[in-house]
Amino acid sequence: MNFPKGTLFNRVNEVDPLTCPKCRGKMRVIAFIEDPHVVKKILRHLNLWESKRPPRPVAHAPPRIEFPTYLPVRRTQTGDDITQPSAEDYVADPVYPMETYF
């Protein structure tokens, strides 16, 4: 597809850059200003050249997570304490032996 630039801009940003914001009439491009000195002079006149940018976001370290240094105690139905899971709690991979993961 071949869209005019204004139409493509309008579809992406949902704003028509060639519509006058005051009277809603159609505008047209009559020139492009390419000289950097002229651009700088116009932006200084409009007080836009030295406008302050918003501050950069401050980088933060990820939150510190405190892990317990003990294993939680689970109680069985008979009242015995279990501090570590049994071998039946783990599922072995039938294709790869456990040594391939270490």
Image (spheres, helix red, strand yellow):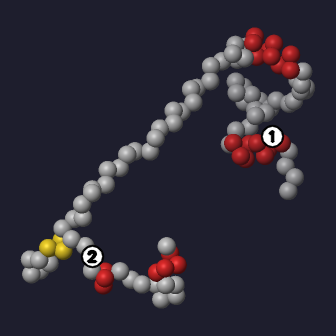
Q: Residues within 10 Å of mark 2 (few under 14, many from 20)?
A: few
**Quick check: 93 above or below 62?**
below
In x, y percent, where is residue 57?
Answer: 54, 33
In the figure, residue 43 lies in which quadrant?
Answer: top right
Q: Which residue is mark 1?
A: 6
Q: Amino acid at mark 1?
A: Gly
In x, y percent, where is residue 53?
Answer: 62, 24
Residue ID at (76%, 42%): 9
Q: Which is more toward the observer, 98 or 46?
A: 98
In x, y percent, where is residue 8?
Answer: 78, 46
Q: Amino acid at mark 2?
A: Pro
Q: Which residue is mark 2?
A: 85
Q: Residues within 10 Å of mark 1 (few under 14, many from 20)?
A: some
How far apart are the alpha carbons under marks 2 and 1?
Answer: 66 Å
Residue 31 located left or right of residue 58: right
In x, y percent, where is residue 35?
Answer: 90, 21
Q: Secondary structure at mark 2?
A: loop
Residue 94's tag is: none
**Quick check: 8 above or below 88?**
above
Kindly check if marks 2 and 1 are in contact, taking CB atoms under 8 A apart as contact: no
